[in-house]
Image (spheres, rainbow, N blue to C red):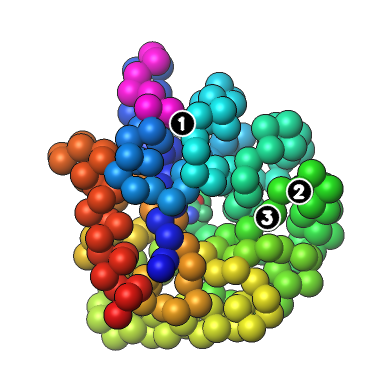
Amino acid sequence: MTKLTVNIDHVATVRQARRIDKPDPVWAAVLAELGGADGITAHLREDRRHVSDRDMRILRQTVKVPLNMEMGLARDIIEIALEIVPDFVTLVPENRQEVTTEGGLDVAGGIGKVKDAIGRFSAKGIPASLFIDADERQIEAAAEVGAWAVEIHTGRYADAANPRERESVLEAIGNAAVSAAAKGLRVHAGHGLDCMNVSAIAAIPQVSELAIGHSIIGRAIMIGMVEAVREMKRLIEAASCR
Ligand code: PXP
């Protein structure tokens, strides 16, 4: 069954709009678990625009399902991850101007840097997943640097302008999933997934885990966090059992 990892960053985004202490993403993580989340993701950005160091540390102590720390390759963030020891890390490119993570990590263009970081995580027993585009060159590079998993970027699929484009991106994601799995990498996928588009990605047999944030937090505002996670879980389960 395809797993669902819930990204709680945007609960922190709402908190930071007022720079006070609520809503608390730690509380949201508890409710996401009650709704059936198989994992919790939080992205500690260099600019700390949403999740804070305090959030990461308390999440580490309270989250019972696997905790995924999403992060760029900045030295101080790597040090924090090594200290917190999440269940796994997902390495992403980070750019201060971006609204959200825009493209995949250029592993092929930065083999040395990524390999060094993965080596440091491995020494602490922390598996590393790499957020990459559905691109064979990046998959080969991910295998070369010793990644544990790849998370295939589904943003272009979610944002496709028409059904033909969506089909073609979906095919590329499917091929990338097959190729990554054949190289011994676990395959995750995420970005831009919602109730309307999740099924086709959840149905890709090699995809073992989906990382979903914005749409679940958006639904949670309307119907509550527990129910928003349950709703997504039902859709993923129906699609991955097909
Ligand atoms: N995976 C990664 C690597 C991301 O950066 C994000 C966005 O924070 C997500 C998944 C979740 O994307 P969304 O919020 O669009 O569901």
The residue at which mark 2 appears reads as 125
In the displayed structure, would residue 111 be above or below residue 162? above
Q: Quadrant of the N terminus?
A: bottom left
Left-right relation of 175 to 91: left
Compare marks 1 and 3 and give the one earlier in the sequence. 1
Q: Does 56 lie within the magenta span?
A: no
Residue name at image x 69 percent, y 54 percent: 127
Element carrying mark 2: loop
Spot occupied by residue 167 in the image (x, y as percentages of width and height): 33, 84
Residue 76, visible in the rendered structure = no
Q: Secondary structure at mark 3?
A: strand
Q: CA distance from mark 1 to mark 2?
A: 27 Å
Residue 108: image x %, image y %? 73, 69
Give the answer, above or below, for where 182 lies relative to 138: below
Q: Is residue 89 left or right of residue 43?
A: right
Q: Amino acid at mark 1?
A: His
Q: Position of residue 156 (x, y in %)?
A: 40, 69
Circle 1 is placed at which residue position?
Answer: 50
Q: Which residue is at the front of the view, 13 or 235?
A: 235
Instruction: Give the residue number, with chain letter if any, for mark 3.
Output: 128
Q: Indicate the amino acid at tag 3.
A: Ala
Magenta region: which residues? 20-27
Vertical placement of residue 121 versus 27, above or below: below
| Secondary structure at numbered mark 1 | loop
Q: Is residue 221 visible?
A: yes
Residue 238 in the image: above or below residue 172: above
C-alpha separation, residue under disc 2 versus residue under disc 3: 10 Å
Sequence-wise, which precedes: disc 1 or disc 2?
1
How many numbered markers are drawn?
A: 3
Which class describes the residues within 10 Å of circle 2: few (<14), some (14-19), or many (20+)? some
> What amino acid does circle 2 point to?
Gly
